[in-house]
Amino acid sequence: MTREDFDLTMVMSLLPTIADKLEDLPFKQRAKQIRNDVVNSIRKQDKFFMDSGNLEIYDQQNKIQRAFLQWLDEMYKNSK
């Protein structure tokens, strides 16, 4: 995997995770519509990326997502 491939995989791993977090936030009216547009755009890009990927990309994306979520949990626990 080239550095460029890794960077793309990293970005495409974090965006769906961020979209999941955005969906959990209680926005109202216009902000909710904008959030939904952003989330839908991320989902479309993720689907395109995953459909054109291979097993190595799936595995790498999964590892990055798990590490990112673990880091977020640690940051939350340490902020209490």
Image (tube, rainbow, N blue to C red):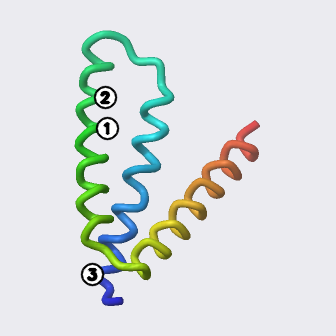
Is the Cβ of the residue at disc 3 closer than 8 Å to that at disc 2? no
Q: Position of residue 24 (x, y in %)?
A: 50, 29
Disc ID at residue 3: none
Q: Position of residue 37 (x, y in %)?
A: 23, 32
Q: Quadrant of residue 36?
A: top left
Give the labeled residue for mark 2: 35
Vertical relation: 70 (above or below) 62:
above
Is the Cβ of the residue at disc 1 closer than 8 Å to that at disc 2? yes
**Element under disc 2:** helix
Give the labeled residue for mark 3: 4
Vertical relation: 25 (above or below) 22:
above
The residue furthest top is 29
**Element under disc 3:** helix
Q: Quadrant of residue 71?
A: bottom right
- CA–CA distance in space, label 3 to label 2: 28 Å
Query: Which one is in front, 5 or 54?
Result: 54
Q: Amino acid at mark 3?
A: Glu
Q: Position of residue 49 (x, y in %)?
A: 27, 64
Q: Position of residue 15 (x, y in %)?
A: 37, 52
Q: Residue at x 24, y 49 (%)?
A: 44
Instruction: Of the two numbered discs 3 and 2 on the same chain, state the one appearing first in sequence.
Output: 3
Query: Within 10 Å of the Cα at label 1, are there few (<14), some (14-19), or many (20+) other Cα atoms?
Result: many
Q: Amino acid at mark 2?
A: Arg
Q: Residue at x 39, y 76 (%)?
A: 57
Query: Which one is in front, 80 or 6?
Result: 6
The residue furthest bottom is 1
**Element under disc 1:** helix
Q: Residue at x 71, y 41 (%)?
A: 79
Give the labeled residue for mark 1: 39
- CA–CA distance in space, label 1 to label 2: 6 Å
Q: Amino acid at mark 1?
A: Val
